[in-house]
Image (spheres, rainbow, N blue to C red):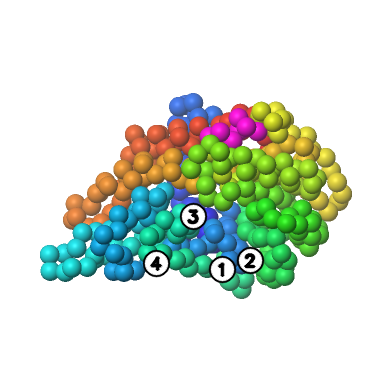
Amino acid sequence: MAADPSVIASAQAAIAVASTLMEEARQRGFGSRGKLPWLMVSLNDGEDPHFRKAEFNAVECPSQCDRPCERVCPAQAIVFHPPRDDYSQVVSSGVISESCYGCGRCLPVCPPQIIYTRSYVSTPGAIAPLVLATGVDAVEIHTQVGRTAEFKRLWLSIAPWIERLKLVAISCPDGDGLIEYLHSLYRLISPLKCPIIWQTDGRPMSGDIGDGTTLAAVKLGQKVLAAGLPGYVQLAGGTNSYTVAKLQAVGMLSQKSKVRSQNNDDSRIPNSEFISGVAYGSYARVLLSPILHQLEQMEVNPANERAIARLENVPELLWQAVELAYSLVSQLKSMELP
């Protein structure tokens, strides 16, 4: 999740609610093992597609434009409201910042090319107190090949609190010199007393486009596995419902991962022959968005003030959402992967 105190507080509240539903989930056949998830915040050491928002001034849109940006947006974050009777311009239209997750699909399809993105970068000085004060369990750092200096600056800002974390993940897309770059990052952060995940960002934020996007994720996973880096390897970027089947087809999943102890400074390290996990981003978001959209339409305040129903108070939607989420995670959870 975003490294924002309000977002973290919301997630913590959600986990507290989820803990009260675990027994019912087990009775419904969702196989709960009684473990609550860890909270991980995402940080970035520079500009990154995961940390940007689309923006444009709807007044500049040509009246004859058929608005392909609105149709192509997977998050339904671009809206156009009809003009008021006494105005000729579109009112209150544009990008809903809270919904936009920066996939960038609107950029190339905009006929007048007036859509742009605004990036935001983590402020290192604000990260350490955040991790220390909010009970965050893990940190995911988004980086790119060639940003060693930027990564080091970010790492030094959180290093005093690393021992409080249960997990560190490093997410990086492919590029020239990728393996050498990842090895250099491992040398920089060693010794590390908690487990590390190398998240291979095959085709960022594209899992909902089609089954072909998972090929990029699997290909990059193969490349990083072959490098023998200490730690776990997790696929991301282009992952969807086809990913696990593809991993099985190419022999990249094991029924039970083997572990080995490398030295006193490292945590137990998995055998680098197999993928240890799959991260679902845009595909999971699109999968669940119809249910969340239904929830948003439910007005629960009799005074007609804007208020959204809570998912846990609408059982029919809650268990639909859980079933959809479980359809993804159960493919790996049932295999006893770490």
246 part of magenta stretch: yes
Residue at figure coordinates x 58%, y 66% from the top left? 47
Q: CA distance from mark 2 to mark 3?
A: 18 Å
Q: CA distance from mark 1 to mark 3?
A: 16 Å
Identity of the amino acid at label 4? Ile
- Which SS class for mark 4? loop
Asked if marks 3 and 4 touch (Cβ < 8 Å), the reply is no
Asked if marks 1 and 2 touch (Cβ < 8 Å), the reply is yes
Measuring from the top left, give residue 196's x and y in whole percent. Answer: 72, 50
Q: Earlier in the sequence, mark 1 or mark 3?
A: 3
- Which SS class for mark 3? loop
Q: Please determine whether, in this image, residue 193 is positioned above or below residue 335.
A: below
Asked if marks 2 and 4 touch (Cβ < 8 Å), the reply is no
Residue at figure coordinates x 48%, y 42% from the top left? 208
Residue labelled with disc 4: 114
Count of numbered circles on the image: 4
Q: Which quadrant of the structure image shows residue 184?
A: bottom right
Residue labelled with disc 2: 45
Q: CA distance from mark 3 to mark 4?
A: 16 Å
Is the residue marked by circle 2 packed among few (<14), some (14-19), or many (20+) residues within 10 Å? many
Residue labelled with disc 1: 121
Residue at figure coordinates x 36%, y 41% from the top left? 290
Identity of the amino acid at label 3? Cys
Left of 327 or right of it: where is 244? right
* Part of the protein shown in magenta: 241-247
194 part of magenta stretch: no
